[in-house]
Amino acid sequence: MKLDCTVLKADVTGIEETFAVVDSNVGPILTAVLGQASDMAKKTFIIPKLNEAGNIGFPLPTMKHIEFTNTSLVLADNHVRISTDVAYRPPTLFLRDTNSLC
């Protein structure tokens, strides 16, 4: 995962899963066959689609005149932690010269 300005982007390189047959009413089921089917689906469809979405990214909320600085991302079990400092950048005020004739 990376932060591109204010857009959180991701690149999926792999997905791990474990298959186990607990009970079957249709006879023996080979988990190796299920694993091969899953691997094919991941390589040809699931991972490419996740990467399409990851390349577009997820825009983080923004506010006018607020800038995120020192941003970090931490991947943890079942969540992503985003921490940042916030800088307020007010608009520059242009004062009119009262001595001018305009």
Image (cartoon, helix red, strand yellow):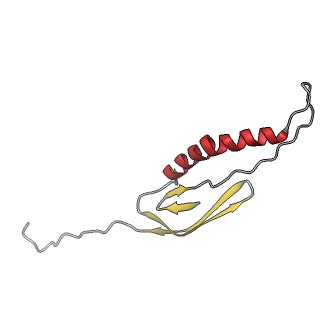
Question: Residue at position x 49%, y 50% from top?
Answer: 56
Residue 13 horizontal/vertical position (percent): 63, 55
Which corner quadrant holds the N terminus?
Answer: bottom right
Quadrant assignment, res 92 = bottom left
The quadrant in which residue 99 appears is bottom left
Quadrant assignment, res 77: bottom right
Tell me: 82 left or right of 3: right
Q: Is residue 59 above or below residue 32?
A: below
Point out residue 45 in the picture as x, y percentages from the top left corner: 60, 40
Q: Which residue is farthest bottom?
A: 99
Q: Nearer the viewer, residue 36 or 22?
A: 36
Q: What residue do we see at 87% from left, 41% from top?
A: 20
Pick the front one: 66 or 39: 39
The residue located at (60%, 42%) in the rendering is: 44
What residue do we see at 54% from left, 56% from top?
9
Screen quadrant of the C terminus: bottom left
Closest to the observer, 73 or 62: 73
Please say if 45 is above or below 99: above
Percent coordinates x, y for residue 21 in the rendering: 89, 37
Task: Locate residue 82, reporting x and y percent.
Answer: 61, 62
Circle count = 0
Task: From the viewer's perspective, tell me whether residue 57 is left or right of residue 91.
Answer: right
Pick out the residue farthest to the left.
101
Above-or-below relation of 70 to 77 = below
Looking at this rendering, what residue extends furthest in the top direction?
A: 26
**Above or below: residue 85 compared with residue 53:** below
Question: For this rendering, which residue is in front, 101 or 82?
Answer: 82
Q: Is residue 100 left or right of residue 31?
A: left
